[in-house]
Image (cartoon, coloured by chain):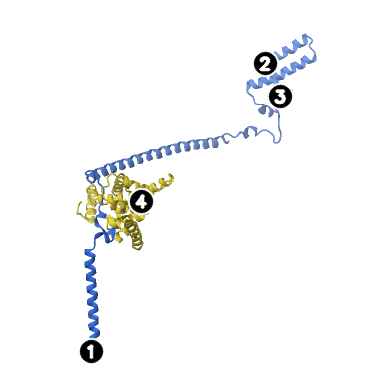
């Protein structure tokens, strides 16, 4: 993963003929982090892969219009989160039409995932996270796994810090209680 | 008084010391506590990613994204060209329709009539008068001036017919038949010559 900072990337991007090079730097820097964030929300590698590529394509197409009103990394994470939430909303609607509970669908995906190589507690954690509403799940993923500050998450989710703290703590205590019951 | 103050200060110092010792003991206990008694979500390994990914997955992402970008930009280009073609076709049709309409308007102005308006054909007819075809035929057959309209051969033929009728002493009914024949002939002539009854009715 490159150590170059976002300001330097944007400076390179503004140079004549260096747009593709700058974009590749963004891809190398952010693709892994974005992938795991998306994977926590979709619980599926293929979906996460498609959404990651879709996010990066959108970043490329919208970079010329990026006015640096926000930081590059919060802007990229916002695209990724919005793309994923839109995707999940469509899937939920489709599940509704076929009279399925989409949270149950996610749980089943986790159980059936052959690429999972964690322990029982890790699986239980992912299962409890999958039960959360989509936006709350996104907040939990950004805070717990990505370890982002509330101010950064506020820029990404366009939600107040207070609301984010409340949402995160509620999810945290709910999941902790469920895991403790699982271990008993 | 000074002794009491001194005792008070000593007591406070002791209290502070006791509180400090209790805190130290608590810290030691928490470090030594087994992991399962602490907050379960604070276990660091839970934040690790428990999935196996395809080999060299992230190194391939760059190439995959580049392919998608090329495809996306290609699709935008073809969409733009389709849009341009559609707009051009729509403008062409609009131009042709406009020209046709313009030609129609020009023709109407030149002829002074509106195309498709049949009211001009009956413009010479007096109002509130329903003239029936049979009435026109009857008036025509009694109008001797119309004999002029017939060809000379037809007139001679009619005259010959009358003479033949007289030779064979045919009754009045045959003469009436001849008269009927005459009106038929007039009718046939009018039809063959394509003269409209309305035109004839207007002749005084």
Q: Position of residue B172 (x, y in %)?
A: 80, 15
Residue A132 coordinates in the image, percent (x, y): 36, 54
Q: Which residue is mark 2?
A: B152
Q: Nearer the viewer, mark 2 or mark 1?
A: 1
Residue B141 at least partly seen? yes
First of labels 1, 3 by sequence position: 1
* Rendered view: A85 above or below B67: below
Q: In the image, which lettered chain appears yellow?
A: A
User: What is the spatial separation of the Cα atoms under label 3 and label 4, in whole angstroms?
Assistant: 88 Å
A74 left or right, relative to B142: left
Tag nearer the camera, 3 or 4: 4
Q: Are marks 2 and 3 on the same chain?
A: yes
Q: Which residue is mark 4?
A: A85
* Tag 1 residue: B3
Question: The residue tagged with tag 3: helix, strand or loop?
Answer: helix
Residue A67 can be seen in this image:
no
Display colour for chain B: blue
User: Alpha carbon of mark 4 to alpha carbon of mark 2: how far?
Assistant: 100 Å
Categorize mark 1 by other alpha carbons within 10 Å: few (<14), some (14-19), many (20+): few
Q: How far, Cα to Cα, is label 2 from label 3?
A: 21 Å
Residue wearing tag 3? B137
Image position of B190 with respect to A30: above or below: above
Q: Which of B200/A137 is in front?
A: A137
């Amino acid at each position: 993963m490159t150590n170059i900072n976002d300001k330097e990337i944007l400076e390179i991007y503004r140079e004549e003929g260096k747009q593709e090079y700058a974009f590749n730097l963004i891809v190398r820097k952010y693709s892994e982090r974005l992938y795991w964030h998306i994977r926590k929300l979709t619980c599926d590698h293929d979906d996460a892969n498609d959404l990651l590529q879709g996010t990066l394509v959108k970043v490329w197409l919208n970079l010329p219009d990026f006015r640096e009103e926000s930081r590059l990394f919060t802007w990229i994470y916002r695209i990724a989160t919005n793309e994923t939430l839109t995707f999940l909303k469509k899937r939920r609607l489709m599940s509704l039409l076929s009279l399925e509970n989409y949270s149950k669908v996610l749980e089943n995906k986790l159980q059936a995932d052959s690429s999972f190589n964690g322990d029982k507690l890790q699986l239980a954690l992912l299962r409890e996270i999958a039960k959360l509403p989509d936006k709350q799940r996104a907040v939990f993923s950004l805070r717990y796994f990505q370890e982002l500050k509330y101010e950064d998450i506020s820029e990404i989710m366009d939600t107040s810090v207070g609301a984010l703290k409340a949402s995160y703590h509620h999810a945290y205590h709910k999941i902790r209680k469920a895991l403790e019951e699982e271990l008993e | 008084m000074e002794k009491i103050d001194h005792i008070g200060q000593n007591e406070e110092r002791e209290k502070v010391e006791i509180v400090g010792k209790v805190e130290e003991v608590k810290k030691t206990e928490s470090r030594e506590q087994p992991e399962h008694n602490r907050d379960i979500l604070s276990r660091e390994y839970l934040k690790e990613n428990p999935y196996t990914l395809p080999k060299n997955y992230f190194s391939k992402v760059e190439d995959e994204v580049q392919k998608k970008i090329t495809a996306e930009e290609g699709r935008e280009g073809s969409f733009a060209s389709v849009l341009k073609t559609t707009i051009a076709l729509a403008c062409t049709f609009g131009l042709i329709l406009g020209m046709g309409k313009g030609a129609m308007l020009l023709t109407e102005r030149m002829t002074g009539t509106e195309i498709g308006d049949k009211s001009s054909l009956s413009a010479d007819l007096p109002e509130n008068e329903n003239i029936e075809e049979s009435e026109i035929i009857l008036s025509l057959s009694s109008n001797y001036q119309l004999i002029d309209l017939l060809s000379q051969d037809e007139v001679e033929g009619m005259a010959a017919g009358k003479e033949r009728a007289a030779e064979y002493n045919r009754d009045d009914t045959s003469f009436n038949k001849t008269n009927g024949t005459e009106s038929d002939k007039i009718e046939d002539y009018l039809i063959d010559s394509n003269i409209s009854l309305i035109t004839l009715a207007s002749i005084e």
